[in-house]
Image (cartoon, grey):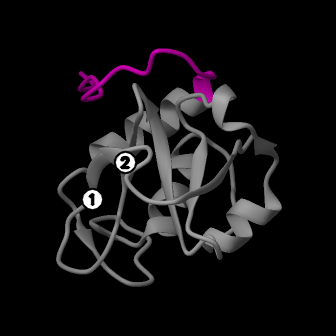
Amino acid sequence: PEEPPVAAPAAGSGRGSAAVAFALGQIGDAYAYGGTGPSAWDCSGLTGGAWAAAGVSVPRTSQAQFFGLPRVSMDALQPGDIVGYYGGVSHVGIYIGNGQIVHASRPGRPVSVAPLYSMPVAGAVRPG
């Protein structure tokens, strides 16, 4: 039987929920620059892997994801949306609901959950 996700999203599309479930399943995996899985990730590798698991192809880099996908306002966030951080969108995470994201943040720190506003937010996009 399939294991349930760590935290059930409150809302969102079926694909967004599938992306969240995949991202939550990677918690504890290693960070690796350029990592696209299956056991080590960088930020955009994780968001891309999550959406690939949901059947949606997204661009590879954080900037290409943020500037190439449909923008969504922060007050309309749904689980599965990709949140961009910092002025140049050098970081992305997957919104999982309840004011939290899953992300692969930096070397030496495993994939983890963090508060949505724990870094400067540039905005959000919604794949698929």
The quarter of the image holding the C terminus is: top right
Q: Residues within 10 Å of mark 2 (few under 14, many from 20)?
A: many
Total numbered circles? 2
Where residue 7 sits, quadrant-wise, is: top left
Q: Residues within 10 Å of mark 1 (few under 14, many from 20)?
A: many
Pick the front one: 29 or 72: 72
Q: Is residue 26 visible?
A: no
**Where 33 sits versus 116, above or below?**
below
Nearest to N terminus: mark 1 or mark 2: 2
**Is residue 65 shown left or right of residue 62?**
right
Pick the front one: 91 or 33: 91
Residue type marked 1: Val
- Under circle 2, the secondary element is strand
Residue type marked 2: Val
The quarter of the image holding the N terminus is: top left
Return the residue at label 1. 111
Residue 16, x across and y down, in percent? 58, 32
Q: Is residue 51 magenta?
A: no
Highlighted range, magenta = 1-15
Q: Which mark is residue 87?
A: none
Q: Residue furthest bottom?
A: 33
Residue found at x 44% / y 71%: 36
Q: Are marks 1 and 2 in contact (CB under 8 Å)?
A: yes
Return the residue at label 2. 102
- Under circle 1, the secondary element is loop
Residue 123, x across and y down, in percent? 66, 51
Residue found at x 56% / y 75%: 90
